[in-house]
Image (cartoon, rainbow, N blue to C red):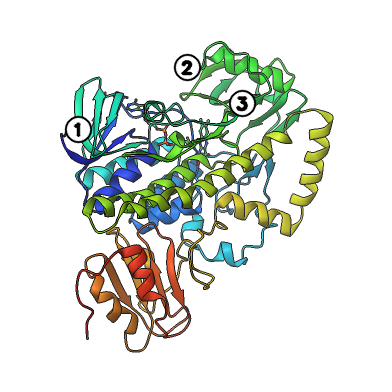
């Protein structure tokens, strides 16, 4: 392990890897400590939503993710379940109600804004983690496996970290160590929320008598299950929390018993084909995302059931938001006030995702009242507006960070603008810095930004609307205008990119 690295990230899950990469791009020295000797191959997230795809796009990783998706689509034998057949638009579901891609208004500006990233969804978590591990390795970040963090002491000017491989000192400690976060517990951060009332399983199994099951989502008074779209793929959701040990490996008997209960059949599983997962609807958010020199991101900061497929994406958003800010504090060009905006900006998104999943559990309980409510929601989702609304929420394209500025792009994830040379903002964002798009006839905006050279990279383009866009390293638009008037640009640069390092060009 490195002694005296600027930041130590605990956990080499998707969030820890993205955070480590962003810190490295920001110039910080960083190491990752991971207790697992080998990467986790368990079936967790199957897909990514638009903000994660935008993130991959902006770091040059989208082509590799698209290749993973192509391979996944080829393996799918049937379109059953959620409209994920090859060639169709990928949407998802709400409480098991498939969001009909053909009903969605894809010309809706929120959806149309992300044409490139919007095309990617199916990237199983182990494949995403492998892709991110390669990215981190290219950036020279060491990942120390088989090292479990067991203690921490925040000394005010750094953190002394106790691990199973000895002690190490670091400037900052980032807990990306999942829902049972040791870092969160050691930092004394409370984790309030709502208790679980169900047990879910995800597995791929050999089934002796698959005709006893119905493809797609099926509801019963005991819960719900989904069979497909890949051969043998099963999801069950069982309103029973009586299993003995949450940390014990999931057995074939356990998945079969759950499937039998919720399907009301005597279906028989003969083998499990991938490492299955068990989850609950334990739904909680950390009382604080930061305590002194300790920060939390991803599942360490919030947990909720995987319904709607948002957890990984939420965590990647945290990592993108935190990475450049902590990097700026470490580099010395930003004060800790910038770090405070991490929690103010990310807490509301986390709270929203928690409620989005709670709402789904609420209509799945299986009693007469939730069945009636589900019927009402099904009616709404059968409309163009209803499905478009749910798809926009599920794909994560509606969120707006509350930032100063009147332009409709401010606070949004940078859209997929086409520049005159055919490139897009994402193509100019691989290095992790700020991007200023200048479409004034005389380069007015770029001239102002020369005072921030090194932090802000300007790209000039033919005159077009929007005329100017300042994009933060996390992809959020900090300032935008439709005119050649630079009002507000200087303030936005000072606010987000710190004090200028140079004099502006004459
Ligand atoms: C069945 C299932 C389906 C899901 N489906 C989706 C989906 O479709 N879409 C979606 O977006 N999300 C989904 N999720 C959620 C997603 O898997 C998680 O949100 C995501 O893994 C969180 O990433 P993370 O990096 O924060 O934490 P994790 O992936 O949990 O990674 C934490 C890492 O920290 C390590 N660690 C823990 N403690 C220590 C310690 N003390 N010292 C060192 N290392 C430690 C762990 O070994 C682990 O590698 C699903 C989850 C499940 C269970």
Q: Is mark 2 within 8 Å of ligand 1?
A: no
Which one is earlier in the sequence, the residue at label 1 or at label 2? 1
Figure quarter occupied by ligand 1: top left
The circle drawn on residue 247 is: 2
Which residue is painted at 43% across and 37% down in the image? Answer: 125
Q: Secondary structure at mark 3?
A: loop
Residue 218 against residue 408 in the figure, above or below: above
Q: Residue at x 25, y 34 (%)?
A: 155
Q: Position of residue 310 (x, y in %)?
A: 53, 43
Disc 1/disc 2 C-alpha distance (Å): 31 Å
User: To which quarter of the image does residue 451 belong?
Assistant: bottom left
Between 274 and 351, the one lying in front of the other is: 351
**Quadrant of res 13:** top left
Q: Is residue 250 above or below residue 332?
A: above
Quarter that holds the N terminus: top left
Q: Quadrant of residue 227?
A: top right
In the image, what residue occupies the spot 21% across and 66% down?
454
- Residue holding disc 3: 195
Mark 2 or mark 3, which is nearer the start of the sequence?
Answer: 3
Q: Earlier in the sequence, mark 1 or mark 3?
A: 1
Residue 168 horizontal/vertical position (percent):
19, 29
| 186 or 393: nearer the viewer | 186
Q: Which residue is mark 1?
A: 169
């Amino acid at each position: 392990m490195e002694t005296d690295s600027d930041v130590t990230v605990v956990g080499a899950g998707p969030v820890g890897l993205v955070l480590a990469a962003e810190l490295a791009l920001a110039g910080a020295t960083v190491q990752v400590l991971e207790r697992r000797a080998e990467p986790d191959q368990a079936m967790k997230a199957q897909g990514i939503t638009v903000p994660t795809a935008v993130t991959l796009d902006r770091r040059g990783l989208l082509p590799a993710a698209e290749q993973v998706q192509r391979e996944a689509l080829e393996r799918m034998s049937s379109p059953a379940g959620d409209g994920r057949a090859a060639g169709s638009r990928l949407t998802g579901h709400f409480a098991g109600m498939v969001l009909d891609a053909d009903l969605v208004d894809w010309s809706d500006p929120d959806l149309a804004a992300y044409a490139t990233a919007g095309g990617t969804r199916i990237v199983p978590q182990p494949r995403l983690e492998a892709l991110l591990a390669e990215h981190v390795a290219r950036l020279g970040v060491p990942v120390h496996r088989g090292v479990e963090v067991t203690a921490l002491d925040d000394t005010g000017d750094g953190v002394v970290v106790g691990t199973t491989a000895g002690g190490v000192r670091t400037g900052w400690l980032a807990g990306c160590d999942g829902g049972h976060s040791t870092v969160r517990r050691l930092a004394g951060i409370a984790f309030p929320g709502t208790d679980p009332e169900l047990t879910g399983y995800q597995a791929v199994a050999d089934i002796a008598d698959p005709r006893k099951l119905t493809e797609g989502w099926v509801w019963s008074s005991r819960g719900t299950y989904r069979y497909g779209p890949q051969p043998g793929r099963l999801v069950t959701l069982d309103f029973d929390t009586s299993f003995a040990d949450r940390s014990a490996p999931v057995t074939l008997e356990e998945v079969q018993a759950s499937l039998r209960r919720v399907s009301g059949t005597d279906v028989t599983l003969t083998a499990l084909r991938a490492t299955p997962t068990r989850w609950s609807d334990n739904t909680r958010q950390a009382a604080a995302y930061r305590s002194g020199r300790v920060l939390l991101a991803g599942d360490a900061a919030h947990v909720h059931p995987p319904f709607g497929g948002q957890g990984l994406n939420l965590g990647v958003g945290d990592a993108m938001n935190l990475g450049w800010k902590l990097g700026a504090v470490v580099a010395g060009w930003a004060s800790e006030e910038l770090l405070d905006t991490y929690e103010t900006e990310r807490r509301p998104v986390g709270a929203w995702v928690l409620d989005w999943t709670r709402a789904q559990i609420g209509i799945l309980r299986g009693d007469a009242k939730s069945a009636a409510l589900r019927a009402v929601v099904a009616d709404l989702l059968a409309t163009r507006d209803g499905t478009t609304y749910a798809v926009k929420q599920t794909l994560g394209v509606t969120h707006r960070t509350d930032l100063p500025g009147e332009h409709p792009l401010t606070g949004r994830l940078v859209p997929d603008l086409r520049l005159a040379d055919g490139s897009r903002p994402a193509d100019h964002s691989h290095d992790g810095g700020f991007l200023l798009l200048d479409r004034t006839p005389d380069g007015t905006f770029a001239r102002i930004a020369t005072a921030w050279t090194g932090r802000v990279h300007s790209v000039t383009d033919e005159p077009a609307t929007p005329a100017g866009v300042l994009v933060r390293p996390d992809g959020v638009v900090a300032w935008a205008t439709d005119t050649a008037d630079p009002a507000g640009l200087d303030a936005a640069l000072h606010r987000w990119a710190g004090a200028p390092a140079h004099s502006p060009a004459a």
